[in-house]
Image (cartoon, grey):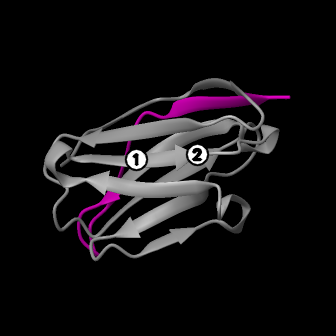
Amino acid sequence: QVQLVESGGGLVQAGGSLRLSCTASRSILGIYAMGWYRQAPGKQRDLVAIMSSGGSKNYADSVKGRFTISRDNAKNTVYLQMSNLKPEDTAVYYCMNKITASSREYWGQGTQVTVSL
């Protein structure tokens, strides 16, 4: 069992930056996968960025070169640094943890990111 708390969302102008944080209630050392997803109104929840326990990272094509996922094991926290934000990045962003390959996924409550023109 793990609880995830996201923070860092808000309103920003196009071209601006935000950093999202996701703090877990347990150690993130060795966690199979940690990632960020987003869901815009009327759309499905889509992968934004994901990091494996070994440190490999994958990004959605739409955010490559603009977003960076990272982690701080000492703080049990995963970050999503978002730069050069665009209006189409507007969505609720969710943090996800998957402790092992066969375990369920755990989700945070979501944090709203709104990018204005």
Check residue 41 for magenta coloring.
Answer: no
The magenta stretch is 97-117
SS at circle 2: strand
SS at circle 1: strand
Residue at left offset 48%, top offset 35%: 110
Q: Are marks 2 and 1 in contact (CB under 8 Å)?
A: no
Check residue 109 for magenta coloring.
Answer: yes
Residue at left offset 55%, top offset 41%: 93
Q: Is residue 75 left or right of residue 23?
A: left
- The residue tagged 1 is 79
Q: How far apart, in angstroms, are the residues tagged by discs 2 and 1?
A: 10 Å
Which residue ends up furthest to the top in the rendered image? Answer: 11
Question: What amino acid type should be assigned to the residue bearing mark 2?
Answer: Met
Residue 12, image x and y in percent?
68, 26
Vertical placement of 57 versus 75: above or below? below
Residue 101, image x and y in percent?
29, 75
Q: Nearer the viewer, residue 110 or 74?
A: 74
Residue 52, image x and y in percent?
34, 72
- The residue tagged 2 is 82
Where is the C terminus found, in terms of image quarters? Answer: top right
Question: Hey, which quadrant is residue 31 in on the image?
Answer: bottom left
